């Protein structure tokens, strides 16, 4: 069964996705409550895999959503699993009706997540993308052995628009496309000029014709969050003028939402951008407001 996201992109329409963080709960009801924040306009709900703190199981969360007829995208980070576990999760997700898979390396666990944890990092995100793509296209497992049936998955990866030099950025991007990434979700965009420069290079290389670039936005909800992101460069540069402008607003969160909506409109007009991804950052209730304010539905 073709995923909703794949159908949207194949039809040439702008895609719309949003992120959710699995609840720190063993209650499936908590997952369903979280899923209720997301409107039907979304082509997929991207289920994060322990990005900055330990939460619930991404696979379980995506499976509960899929069972409730919500289009889910499972994020899988290679930081925490070796190739045996990664392969098992990909097969399990397909069996549970999850039709989209996002292959990531994951932020190092020492940066706040769980410094005492050991890292697996058996393979990287490019190798994972290639391995799962072979499961889909050729019907073989990670070792090249024939599977009873091909895995039904729409496979994507991440892209970082602000990595420089540009030549090395494009080399990594080309590797992900060659590995089989059908779409690329970018890091959050605050510096539209820098993103536009990257997109120009992507178009010059013809990569926008080989994969779907989906640009990410993140609503800033507090000055502390903005300053932390600026310091850690988690998603890329947060320009000081952006922070200064929001700091002067009577309502920082509302101003952050308005800025995010305006950024989405700018990104949609850039040639080669095939959709918008909302990084909710744990504020999933903002997704519907942002979609309405930015006219993304």
Image (cartoon, rainbow, N blue to C red):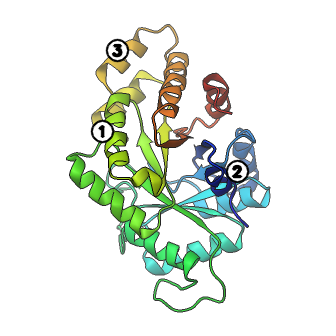
Q: Is residue 291 left or right of residue 272?
A: right
Q: Which of these two is toward me, 246 or 41?
A: 41
Q: Residues within 10 Å of mark 3 (few under 14, many from 20)?
A: few
- The quadrant the N terminus occupies is bottom right
Going 23% across and 54% down the picture, which residue do you hit? 168
Q: Which of these two is toward me, 86 or 111?
A: 86
Where does label 1 land, which residue?
Answer: 232
Residue 278 locus on image (x, y percent):
55, 38
Q: Is residue 205 left or right of residue 248?
A: left
Where does label 3 land, which residue?
Answer: 244
Q: Residues within 10 Å of mark 1 (few under 14, many from 20)?
A: few
Where does label 2 land, which residue?
Answer: 31
Q: Is residue 241 above or below residue 74?
A: above
Q: Nearer the viewer, mark 2 or mark 3?
A: 3
The Cα atoms of the two marked residues, 1 and 3, are separated by 18 Å
Q: Is residue 253 left or right of residue 69?
A: left
Say which label, 1 or 3, has the lower sequence index. 1
- Looking at this view, name the residue that lies furthest to the left: 165
Residue 84 locus on image (x, y percent):
48, 81
Answer whether residue 53 is visible to the viewer in this image: no
Q: Which of these two is toward me, 160 or 219?
A: 160
Looking at the rendered structure, the secondary structure element under dot 2 is helix
Looking at the rendered structure, the secondary structure element under dot 3 is helix
Going 67% across and 26% down the picture, which residue do you hit? 292
Say which label, 2 or 3, has the lower sequence index. 2
The Cα atoms of the two marked residues, 2 and 1, are separated by 29 Å
């Amino acid at each position: 069964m073709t995923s909703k996201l794949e159908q949207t992109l194949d039809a040439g329409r702008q895609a719309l996705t949003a992120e959710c963080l699995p609840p720190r709960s063993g209650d499936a009801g908590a997952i369903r409550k979280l899923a209720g924040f997301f409107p039907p306009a979304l082509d997929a709900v991207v289920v994060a895999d322990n990005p900055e703190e330990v939460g619930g199981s991404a696979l379980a969360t995506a499976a509960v959503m899929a069972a409730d007829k919500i289009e889910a995208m499972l994020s899988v980070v290679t930081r925490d699993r070796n190739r045996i576990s990664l392969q098992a999760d990909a097969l399990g997700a397909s069996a549970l009706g999850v039709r989209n898979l996002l292959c990531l390396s994951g932020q190092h666990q020492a940066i706040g997540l769980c410094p005492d944890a050991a890292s697996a990092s058996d393979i990287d995100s490019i190798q994972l993308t290639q391995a799962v793509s072979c499961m889909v296209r050729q019907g073989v497992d990670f070792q090249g052995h024939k599977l009873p049936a091909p895995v039904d998955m729409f496979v994507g990866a991440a892209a970082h628009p602000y990595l420089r030099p540009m030549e090395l950025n494009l080399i990594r991007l080309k590797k992900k496309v060659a590995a089989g990434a059908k779409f690329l979700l970018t890091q959050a965009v605050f510096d539209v000029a820098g993103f536009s420069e990257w997109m120009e290079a992507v178009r010059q290389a013809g990569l926008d014709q080989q994969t779907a670039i989906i640009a990410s936005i993140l609503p800033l909800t507090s000055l502390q969050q903005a300053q932390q992101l600026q310091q850690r460069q988690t998603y890329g540069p947060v320009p000081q003028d952006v922070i200064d402008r929001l700091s002067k607003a009577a309502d920082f969160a509302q101003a952050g939402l308005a800025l995010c909506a305006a950024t989405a409109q700018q990104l949609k007009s850039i040639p080669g951008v095939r959709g918008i991804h909302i990084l909710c950052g744990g504020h999933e209730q903002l997704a519907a407001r942002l979609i309405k304010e930015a006219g993304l539905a």
